[in-house]
Image (cartoon, rainbow, N blue to C red):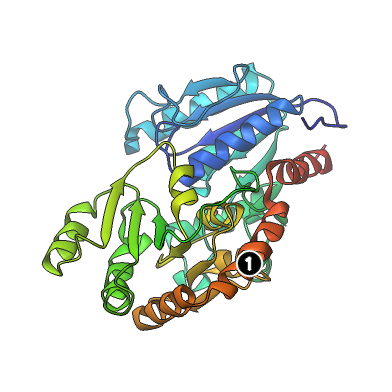
C-alpha cells in the first residue's frame, strides 16, 4: 500500500455521470479514490448522477454524497448542485477538489469562488482545437485559466492544452491505471479476436463488423467476440444477421468478469472512432494480447508505442481487416508483441499512477 509523505488531505471528488455504471471514467475515478484513500487521504465522492449502487468497489471509509434528486440533472438543478458542492467544501473543510470529468467543471468552478481550496480538473477526452468555442472547448479554457492544475491522460494532449489555452494552471499528464496486474498464464491458439466497450457509435463496432466481413472470408476459423452493451445492439445484430455472420461473431453483452474473455482471446482489436486514452488497451497488454487499433487519438498511439502492436489509419476498414489477417497468420509476431506489451504495461500499474497523483497533490500544498 502506498503512503503519502505529505499532510493527509480531505479531498472532494465530483463525478458528473455518477457511480452506478461500469464506464471507464467511473472505473478510474473509483480506482484513484481508493488509492488516495489507502495513502491516508480522506475522500468524499460527490455525484451529480446516480450513486446509490456503485458499480465498482469502493473503500469503506470513502463517503458518497448525491448532489441531485434524479438521475438526470435538469437546468434548474444546476444552481442547486453548485450550492451543495460549495456547502460541502465549507462544512467538510475540504483541502482539494477534483472534477473527475471536465463536464463537472461548470459545477466545481463557481462552487470554489473565493474559497481557499485547490482545484484539479481531470480531462478524459481529447482537446480538439478545431472545435472552436464549443461548449466543451469553453469549459476547457476555463479550466486552464482557473483550476490550479489540469490532468490529461497523455503527453500529446498535455501539449495541446499548453499550446491552445491561455493557461495559468499547471498542466500535467497522468495516465489511467490498469485494473489488472501483468498476467503470467495466457491460453493460446483459441483463434478469438476480442473487442470490449459500450455499444455506442463512438466505439466503431459497426466498422469492425465491416472489416470482419473481409477477415472471415480469408480466416473462417477465427471468431470475433464483442463484450459490452448499449444502444447500438439492435443495429449491430441486424448487420450480423443480414451478412450471415452469426457463426463467427458473438455480441456477449455486459460482463462483470471481463478477465475471462481476455484470457480466451488471441488478439485484441480497438475500432473506436475517437478514444481519449483507451483503458482496454492497457488491460489487453496486461493479458499479453497483441493489438490492432485505429489511430483514433493520442491515447492508442501513446499506450501502444514500443509494443509492436499495430496502428492503422482511423476509420480505414480495409486496413483494419488487412492488419488483423496478417497478425492472425504470424505467430512469431504475436509472441513478440505479447512480451513487449507486458513490459510496457508495468508503467500503468496502479501504484505507479497513484504515486503521480500523490506528487501532484503535494505540489499544490
**Which residue corresponds to the image point at 66% horizontal and 51% vertical from the top-left?**
150
Q: Position of residue 44 (x, y in %)?
A: 60, 24
**Image quadrant for the C terminus?**
top right
**Which residue corresponds to the image point at 43% horizontal and 26% vertical from the top-left?**
51
Classify 10 Å Cα crowding around label 1: few (below 14), some (14-19), many (20 and above).
some
> SS for tag 1?
helix
In front: 118, or 336?
A: 336
The reply, left or right, for residue 178 in relation to residue 249 is: right
Above or below residue 360? Residue 18 is above
The reply, left or right, for residue 170 in relation to residue 89 is: right
Q: Position of residue 152 (x, y in %)?
A: 63, 56
The reply, left or right, for residue 290 in relation to residue 199 is: right
Above or below residue 210? Residue 7 is above
Above or below residue 362? Residue 298 is below
**Image quadrant for the N terminus?**
top right
Q: Position of residue 288 (x, y in %)?
A: 59, 57
The reply, left or right, for residue 171 in relation to residue 192 is: right
Disc 1 target residue: 302
In this orientation, does residue 169 appear?
A: no
User: How many marks on residues?
Assistant: 1
Q: Position of residue 239 (x, y in %)?
A: 17, 65
In terms of image quadrants, where is residue 305? bottom right
Extreme residue in the right direction: 5
Amino acid at each position: 500500500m502506498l503512503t503519502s509523505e505529505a499532510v493527509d488531505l480531505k479531498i472532494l471528488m465530483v463525478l458528473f455521470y455518477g457511480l452506478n455504471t461500469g464506464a471507464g471514467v467511473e472505473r478510474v475515478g473509483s480506482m484513484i479514490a481508493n488509492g488516495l484513500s489507502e495513502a491516508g487521504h480522506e475522500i468524499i465522492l460527490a455525484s451529480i448522477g446516480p450513486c446509490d449502487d456503485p458499480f465498482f468497489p469502493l473503500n469503506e471509509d470513502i463517503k458518497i454524497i448525491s448532489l441531485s434528486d434524479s438521475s438526470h440533472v435538469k437546468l434548474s438543478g444546476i444552481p442547486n448542485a453548485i450550492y451543495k458542492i460549495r456547502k460541502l467544501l465549507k462544512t467538510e473543510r475540504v483541502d482539494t477538489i477534483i472534477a473527475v470529468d471536465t463536464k463537472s467543471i461548470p459545477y466545481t468552478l463557481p462552487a470554489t469562488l473565493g474559497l481557499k481550496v485547490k482545484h484539479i480538473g481531470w480531462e478524459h477526452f481529447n482537446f480538439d482545437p478545431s472545435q472552436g468555442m464549443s461548449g466543451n472547448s469553453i469549459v476547457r479554457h476555463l479550466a486552464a485559466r482557473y483550476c490550479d492544475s489540469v490532468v490529461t491522460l497523455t503527453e500529446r494532449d498535455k501539449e495541446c492544452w499548453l499550446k491552445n489555452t491561455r493557461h495559468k494552471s499547471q498542466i500535467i499528464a497522468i495516465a489511467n491505471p490498469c485494473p489488472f496486474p501483468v498476467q503470467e498464464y495466457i491460453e493460446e491458439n483459441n483463434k478469438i479476436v476480442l473487442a470490449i466497450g459500450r455499444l455506442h457509435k463512438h466505439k466503431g463496432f459497426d466498422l469492425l463488423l465491416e472489416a470482419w466481413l473481409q477477415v472471415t472470408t480469408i480466416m473462417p476459423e477465427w471468431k470475433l467476440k464483442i463484450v459490452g452493451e448499449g444502444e447500438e445492439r439492435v443495429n449491430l445484430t441486424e448487420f450480423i444477421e443480414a451478412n450471415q455472420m452469426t457463426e463467427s461473431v458473438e455480441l456477449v453483452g455486459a460482463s462483470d468478469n471481463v478477465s475471462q474473455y481476455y484470457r480466451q482471446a488471441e488478439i485484441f482489436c480497438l475500432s473506436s472512432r475517437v478514444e481519449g486514452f483507451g483503458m482496454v488497451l492497457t488491460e489487453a497488454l496486461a493479458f499479453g494480447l497483441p493489438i490492432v487499433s485505429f489511430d483514433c487519438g493520442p491515447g492508442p498511439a501513446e499506450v501502444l508505442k514500443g509494443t509492436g502492436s499495430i496502428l492503422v489509419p482511423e476509420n480505414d476498414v480495409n486496413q483494419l481487416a488487412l492488419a488483423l489477417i496478417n497478425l492472425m497468420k504470424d505467430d512469431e509476431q504475436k509472441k513478440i508483441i505479447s512480451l513487449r506489451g507486458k513490459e510496457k504495461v508495468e508503467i500503468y500499474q496502479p501504484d505507479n499512477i497513484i504515486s503521480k497523483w500523490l506528487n501532484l497533490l503535494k505540489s499544490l500544498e
